[in-house]
Amino acid sequence: MSRFELMDTAPTPERAILVGVDWRSDGWPIERSLDELERLADTAGAGTVARLTQQLDRPVPKSYIGSGKVEELKGFVQRLDADVVIFDDDLSPSQQSYLERALGEPTKVIDRTALILDIFGLHARTREGRLQVQLAQLQYLLPRLRGMWSHLAKEQTRGGIGSRFGQGESQLEIDRRMIRNRIAQLRHELREVEKRRDVQSKKRNDSQTFRIALAGYTNAGKSSLLNQLCGPSVLAQDKLFATLDPTTRSLSLPGGRNVTITDTVGFIQKLPHGLVEAFKSTLSEVRDADLILRVVDISDADYPRHVDAVEHVLDEVGAAEQPAVTVYNKIDRLDPSEVESLRRREPEAVFFSAVSGEGKEELLNRIIHEASACDAPISCEIPYREGLLLSSIRTQGNILTEEYLEDRIRLVCKVPRHIAARVKPYVTE
């Protein structure tokens, strides 16, 4: 071998075994759910080497899966040299501890929530995003904390030297107290960030700019849709949770009206409740929007279940009653006859391709319609000297016709009510 041969420094992907339980009461097919779990594992940097499934009515209290399956899983781990075992559902702290002991070191046992938290930790970029993820991670860790000094606690039962320290229990309590203090600190910092967000939100409210929020299942193409409408600047990857931090862009609609569009974190089935709680300040962008675009990956066979998962989270954050338009994305992956069939079934939806731009004009027209639904139609003649008023009409209204006269502009337009009051002196009809 050459003295100067380069060595591969790329990290070796962890070898993962996926474990899923087929609940008879669950509407998600187990293989579909494990397909999604495999994509999550891939996003976190792990390669799946095997899957193990079992059909149960309820989890086994001690080990979550049956004792026979635990032995089968142990054999898989040893034969395939697995680094991590990932369960598709949440494990209790005691179940996780039992499985780790049964499988033996150094194999890790984690559940779906831990995997999602790990991915969020990788992808959070802004200070607010990192605070939110750290809060959710610590809330998850706290009940699972085990004493690093437990070997000293065991010495107490033997008597003699070293039996009088009792550091096992005290060290565990110290660790728990440190985590609780850090959680309280994070909550305080997030409240401060939320106050600043509220100030920014109030400024947008005062400006009366029509606000749109994108909501949808992770990897439905929200970022790609935003880039198609406003120009490329947002990371768009074919990975789950590629973007976490909300991004707000300005869009000038045909006719001159300006609106804002905010891309938010994607949703997923079995989204950890702690994450919803931690990201509530971010998700308030959805709750406070004038219009929600529910982006759906129509090419995914499970899209009806994705829609249900999104509706569940929107309801949880108080946005279920907001005006909304369903945008079926990725129609470029379907046969045109399938798209036409779907159009007949759902005439109120918009069919769109963020890749080719097909349906963009339809989507923009729908946004114009929704933005001007409460606007008052007006015929008026505005003097050229009213430059500020003319600018407000162009940016916040929808001009239907305009005619340039000697000292004024004759307009037929639809404007928000707060602008209609300023236009009133110049109304002609």
Image (cartoon, rainbow, N blue to C red):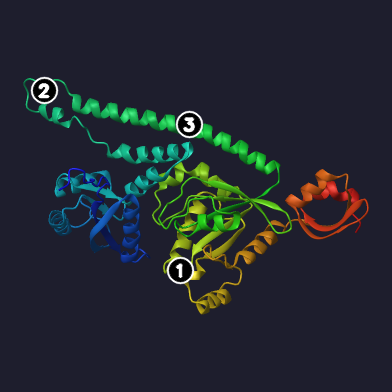
Q: Nearer the viewer, residue 5 or 268?
A: 5
Residue 278 percent location from the top left of the image:
45, 41
* Residue at (40, 37) in percent of width and height: 135
Q: Quadrant of residue 41?
A: bottom left
In the rendered image, is residue 418 in sight? Answer: no
Q: Residues within 10 Å of mark 3 (few under 14, many from 20)?
A: some
Q: Quadrant of the C terminus?
A: bottom right
Residue position for label 2? 163
Check disc 1 and report the residue beneath it: 299
Spot occupied by residue 331 in the image (x, y as percentages of width and height):
51, 69
Total numbered circles: 3
Q: Tell me the distance, in whole angstroms, between the alpha carbons under discs 3 and 2.
A: 42 Å
Residue positioned 59% across, 38% down in the render: 198
Callout 2: helix, strand or loop?
Answer: loop
Mark seen at residue 189:
3
In terms of sequence position, does the residue under pointer 3 or pointer 2 come before the other?
Answer: 2
